[in-house]
Amino acid sequence: MSPVRWLLDRLTAVGELVTVRPVSLYAAAVLRIGYGLLYLTFLLREFPHREEIWGPESPWTPALAQQLFAQTGWTSILTLSDSHVYFELCYALAVATSVLFMLGWRTRALSCLFAVVVTSFHARAIFMTDGGDNLVLLMALYLVLTACGRRWSLDARRIRRRAAGHNIPGPAEPGGIRRRLRAGRATLTTVVHNCGMFVIAAQICFLYGSAGLYKVQGASWGAGTALHYVLHLQLFQPWPALSQVVDEHTVVIAIAGYLTVLLQVAFPFVLFGRLKYPVLVMLLTMHLGIALLMGLPLFSGAMIVADAAFLPDRFYAALPASVRRAVLRSGLRQRASSRTTPGIGSVPAQGRSEGSGRKPRCPLPDRHGDATTLTTGPER
């Protein structure tokens, strides 16, 4: 095959991949559910402190926010009014939007509203949060482009019910213009969705790669002592005693530091093979450790949800059946264990009278002359 022919075949395959079939629909649904739930948890966690962070009486006043907006070009719906009632309404709207977006109700409109909510709250107090919402902000903007409501959503459920209720074919359309418009709309939606998912994947790869390369330049990461200093930062010590216990294992700390750099640098290069699965598991362990030892659950949760975008749709499609089989298997084990006879160490069955339907136990001598007890089953 000539190089030109090979190149044309590859370009045709890429064109079909982008325009014919939407990719990673289940992964997009996981991103929608994950970030909706994560931001809902964030808003509920900060509910007692909402006035200090985003309210009109916050130390970062609306006037200071407006001065920053003039320099950065950001904007926020929270600065449109200084009224406390308006702020409470915006907060209630943010909570309701997160819930509905997570459930997948009218996802096309709710994805845009969710992006506006996240952008507004992030821009209103950009210096007041711990920075874990930066990735949530980026993903909220990218999810607007995706068809994240086609799986595991109220929209998908409504479409299935509507299709089940209209099994009878309707009258033929008067012309082909409507069909062409629908086909063009479907193609455009597919292209935008696929591009959105590719941008999300590229963003995560860039994040890991740049973080790993930045760590390589540091002397403490090269010496294996970076995590030692991280564990002694008082600002990121939710449990100082636990950090002290972990820091006592110096060899493990050094290996974890080197492994962190290796995983982050190698992440973009292992996505097209089976090696990505153990890498994703190790990254999951790393983020859980960050959430536990450094007290950054929002950042860790955002990264874990982002990593879930690289699992194939066949994994998510088989997940409900696997969970049902596991639940059924555990139920069968519990019933089987409840029906087993008492083993050694249990209280032996007591003898009954002759009218009870069981034979009495009688001592029988064994080959060594000792007496043993033999219990026979019920008469049949």
Image (cartoon, rainbow, N blue to C red):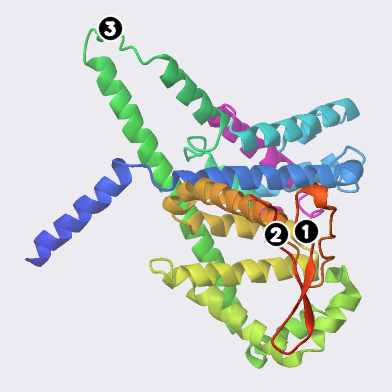
Magenta stretch bounds: 105-134
Closest to the observer: 295 or 356? 356
Q: In the image, is residue 32 part of the stretch drawn in magenta?
A: no
Give the labeled residue for mark 2. Answer: 299
The circle drawn on residue 171 is 3
Identify the amino acid type marked 3: Pro
Q: Is residue 368 above or below residue 311?
A: below
Q: Residue at x 85, y 60 (%)?
A: 350
Give the labeled residue for mark 1. Answer: 130
Q: Is there a contact, CB below 8 Å, between mark 2 and mark 1? A: yes
Q: Earlier in the sequence, mark 3 or mark 1?
A: 1
Q: Is there a contact, CB below 8 Å, between mark 3 and mark 1? A: no
Inter-mark Cα distance, 2 to 1? 8 Å
Q: Residue at x 27, y 19 (%)?
A: 179
- Judged by depth in the image, the label closer to the viewer, 2 or 1, is 2
The circle drawn on residue 229 is none
| Residue 13 visible in the current orientation | yes
Q: Residues within 10 Å of mark 3 (few under 14, many from 20)?
A: few
Identify the amino acid type marked 1: Asp
Quadrant housing residue 25: top left
Inter-mark Cα distance, 3 to 2? 53 Å
| Residue 123 visible in the current orientation | no
Name the magenta segment's main secondary structure.
helix
Closest to the observer: 320 or 11? 320
- Judged by depth in the image, the label closer to the viewer, 3 or 1, is 3
Q: Residue 57, position in %: x, y?
A: 92, 40
